[in-house]
Image (cartoon, grey):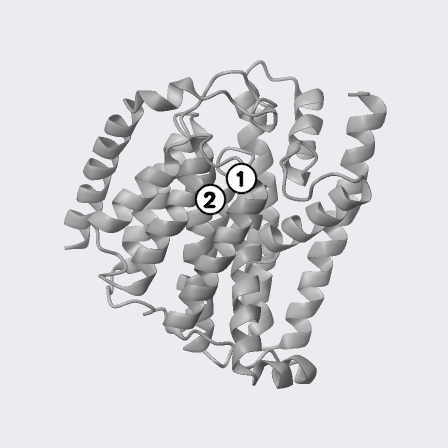
Amino acid sequence: MRYIEIISIFFISFTIYLFLNKFKIFYKIKKDHHQNFTHKDFILPIGGYYLLVSLIIFNLLTISLEIYYLILIFFIGALSDLKKFNSPKLRLIIQSILILLFIYQSQIQILSTRIDFLDNLLTNYYFNIFFVSFCLLIVINGTNFIDGLNGLVLTYYLCIIFILFSSGLNIKIFENEFFFIQLIGILSILLVLNIFNKLYLGDSGSYLLGFLFSVILIKFYLINQSISPFFIILLLWYPCFENLFSILRKYKYRKSPIKPDTKHLHQLLFYFLDSKLKFKNKLVNNNLSSFLINFFNLIIFIIGLSQSAKTNIQIFLILINVITYLFIYSRLFKYRYRNLKK
């Protein structure tokens, strides 16, 4: 049964790609400045379409509340990709409303963070709704922030799936027992197309993945209370910290915190490798940058998994991540803007 499903995923996924590749309206879209830093070719931002259609076809979430909100989140990103919804503030407002409604309707709550002060606040129903909604918004937009290199987002979330499989804990989050197997197949095909520059995730794809994995990991924690909630934070630390750090960084330079730029860690790493290795094909350094970032993350995830119940260990690993990020960022930033003078 699983072999038939895997073959079906490959066949249907490729058919979806061929169909979306002929969606000519995308060719009329002018690329943003932050999308031009690796190459000049226009790549179709249709990853979100592929992902959503695949999710619906394989009925991964069954007919549930999540699928309706996935569609709504997708449309926000799709309109952004089509340059029909250009206001970052308005997108954030509508995202916030949708996420609040989803949390309210789904009744997802986080009652224990192992921080007494915060746990007392979370006993208030309305504070709990706003807190969980805030967490989802950070992950959704953080995922969009790190979606600047081929394969970076997709490999990151495939690493998380690998960790969940390796945990030995209950991963039956949705009714479909083959959920993760199907999801691995879908993301793997999307990853191949992405690393070979055949498509981009686009805002629609990054929003979808951010929302989907936020829900997955919250539900994973709720059915596995033996693990520390900070293990979940560890798994999502990169998009979350990239989001928060970017906001602070842009605020310091008096720039809009929600407008894109080319000063993210992954972009600086690409510039560094591109100047040092000097491959003619920039795609090599593009993919290499993604690999290095996610190799580091995977090692940290594996260490965290071995001590998943110990909050102090998880906090220590998160701090290691943050310190490492800030140290590398400062060095790469100085190299980029002091040596290259661009």
- The quadrant of the rendering that contains the N terminus is bottom left
Residue, x 53% and y 52% (percent of image)? 93
User: Picture coordinates of residue 15 (x, y %)?
Assistant: 21, 32
User: Picture coordinates of residue 232 (x, y %)?
Assistant: 54, 66
User: Picture coordinates of residue 208 (x, y %)?
Assistant: 41, 49
Q: Which numbered circle lies on residue 206?
A: 2
Up/down of 204 relative to 313, above or below: above
Up/down of 310 relative to 33, above or below: below
Q: Is residue 229 visible?
A: yes
Between 44 and 258, the residue placed more toward the observer is 258
- In the figure, residue 169 lies in which quadrant? bottom left
Between 40 and 258, the residue placed more toward the observer is 258
Q: Earlier in the sequence, mark 2 or mark 1?
A: 1
Name the element at disc 1: loop
Residue, x 79% and y 40% (percent of image)? 254
- Marks 2 & 1, CB-CB < 8 Å contact: yes
Residue, x 55% and y 69% (percent of image)? 130
Q: Which numbered circle lies on residue 147?
A: 1
Amino acid at dot 1: Asp
Residue, x 25% and y 68% (percent of image)? 175
Amino acid at dot 2: Ser
User: Picture coordinates of residue 59 (x, y %)?
Assistant: 22, 55
